[in-house]
Image (cartoon, rainbow, N blue to C red):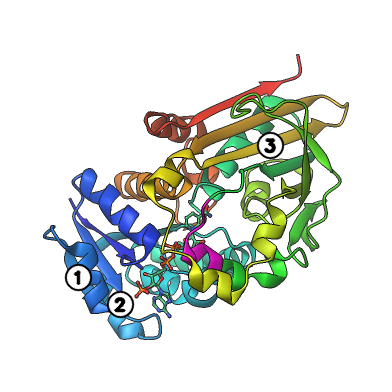
């Protein structure tokens, strides 16, 4: 089996990705900027360690040499993601990452689609607990609607829960976006500036309701789905929202708060931290379809999702280019592969 490289392998998510690859018996190369931290992350295994900072093109190229795919877990992607994508494409490696950062994600599609196609490699960014299942469930929901959607709302309905220091630093790097200014929506065939959202509340989804009933208050929030979903779903408008009480938590992160956090939430906190992505599609005649996907331990699940995606790219013959998850993976099949990890999902259409 060919090796998979993990960039940022000494970080919180990176270590979870390394563990998931090891659990599946995949040979791993741990890559990052700090040899001592990488060696600690590799302790107890015979995994290879290769040192390469994001500013060192030659070292990155050498680090990915001979690998079938790269899983990028750097933070924040806004600051450090692109050199890793560039190096993976140049080395002929398929690529996935765990970003949830909308502006970085859009730049990856804009900047690397042509070079990835020419290199014959497939790049699937945002393969984390929001961008991965959110994109797949949006595809299935639109399919259930069976016609062009007048509007499609993607909602991140996670409850407040523990975040990693890397996520907090990512929030700082995306202050403008996650603070509520900026972001994109999709309208009439183009991406447009502004995280506008007409929905102020959304119905509690059946899957993942966890005792909640009625309507949930939501607020506009820049999610990855608006960049990926219009690539494979027919919709006049695509908007993204988040549970209203969670928005200020992301927007209000300070340097002091981030510095005081532990590297990641502990296993007990992770076990009860619930994530929930829901999609609401409305057709021209008012017909609707709804889908939702949920689970716990967003960080552990993100590692499973990224590894599942990387291994599917390596095992299959994916079309080259930068692609949304649902453009590469069969959505129901991918979600079914997450079920043994506690993921539940459903799609329902009116009638
Ligand atoms: N969308 C989602 O649902 C989701 C879920 C999970 C994770 N994520 C994202 O995944 C990313 C990783 O999160 P995390 O909690 O694992 O963060 P983390 O623990 O801080 O790890 C970040 C990694 O990036 C490396 N890094 C930072 N600055 C670097 C630089 N200048 N040059 C090279 N490497 C650098 C760090 O290296 P060192 O180890 O040497 O410090 C570390 O390995 C974050 O952006 C987070 O938001 C998203």
Q: Which image quadrant is residue 13 in?
A: bottom left
**Comes first in the chain, label 1 or label 2:** 1
Q: Where is residue 301 in the image (x, y as percent from the top left)?
A: 42, 44
Residues rendered magenta in the picture: 162-168
Residue 301 appears in the rendering: no
Residue 269 appears in the rendering: yes
Judging by the rendered image, the residue that carries numbered circle 3 is 279
Q: How far apart are marks 3 and 1 (CA)?
A: 42 Å
**Comes first in the chain, label 3 or label 2:** 2
Q: Where is residue 247 in the image (x, y as percent from the top left)?
A: 71, 55
Instruction: Tell me if mark 1 has few (under 14), some (14-19) or many (20+) residues whose alpha carbon lies within 10 angstroms of its own.
Output: some
Judging by the rendered image, the residue that carries numbered circle 1 is 39
Instruction: Tell me if mark 3 has few (under 14), some (14-19) or many (20+) residues whose alpha carbon lies within 10 angstroms of its own.
Output: many
* Residue in the foreground of this view, choosing between 339 and 335: 339
Q: Distance between the residues labelled 3 and 2?
A: 39 Å
* Horizontal side, residue 347 vs residue 14: left or right: right
Q: Which residue is drawn at 37% across and 29% down?
A: 340
Q: Residue 61 carries which label?
A: 2
For the residue with label 2, is its CB less than 8 Å from the closest atom of ligand 1?
no
Q: Which image quadrant is residue 97 in?
A: bottom left
Q: Residue at x 64, y 47 (%)?
A: 229
Closer to viewer: mark 3 or mark 1: 1
Please check the rendered image and state whether residue 166 is part of the magenta-colored stretch, yes or no.
yes
The number of discs equals 3
- Cβ–Cβ under 8 Å for marks 3 and 1: no
């Amino acid at each position: 089996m060919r090796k998979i490289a993990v960039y940022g392998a000494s970080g919180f998510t990176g270590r979870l990705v390394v563990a998931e690859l090891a659990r599946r018996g995949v040979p791993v190369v741990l890559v990052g900027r700090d040899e001592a931290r990488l060696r600690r992350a590799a302790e107890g295994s015979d995994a290879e360690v290769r040192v390469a900072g994001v500013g060192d093109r030659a070292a990155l190229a050498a680090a990915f040499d001979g690998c079938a795919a790269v899983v990028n877990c750097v933070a924040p992607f806004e600051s450090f993601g692109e050199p890793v994508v560039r190096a993976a494409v140049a080395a002929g490696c398929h690529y996935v990452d765990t970003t949830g950062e909308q502006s970085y994600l859009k730049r990856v599609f804009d900047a690397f689609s042509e070079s990835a196609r020419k290199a014959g490699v497939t790049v699937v960014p945002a393969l984390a607990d929001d961008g991965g299942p959110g994109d797949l469930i949006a595809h299935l929901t639109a399919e259930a609607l069976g016609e062009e959607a007048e509007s499609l709302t993607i909602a991140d309905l996670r409850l407040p829960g523990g975040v990693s220091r890397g996520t907090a630093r990512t929030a700082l790097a995306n202050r403008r976006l996650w603070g509520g200014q900026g972001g994109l929506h999709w309208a009439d065939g183009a991406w447009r500036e502004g995280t506008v959202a007409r929905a102020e509340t959304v119905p509690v989804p059946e899957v993942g309701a966890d005792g909640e009933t009625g309507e949930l208050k939501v607020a506009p929030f820049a999610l990855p789905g608006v960049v990926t979903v219009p690539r494979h779903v027919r919709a006049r408008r695509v908007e993204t929202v988040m549970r209203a009480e969670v928005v200020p938590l992301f927007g209000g992160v300070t340097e002091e708060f981030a510095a005081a956090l532990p590297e990641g939430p502990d296993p007990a906190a992770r076990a009860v931290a619930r994530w929930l992505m829901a999609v609401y599609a409305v057709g021209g005649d008012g017909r609707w379809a709804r889908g939702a996907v949920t689970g716990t331990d967003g960080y552990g699940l993100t590692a499973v999702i990224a590894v599942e995606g990387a291994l599917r790219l390596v095992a299959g013959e994916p079309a080259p280019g930068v692609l949304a998850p649902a453009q590469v993976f069969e959505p129901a099949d991918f979600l079914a592969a997450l079920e043994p990890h506690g993921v539940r999902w459903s799609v329902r259409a009116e009638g």
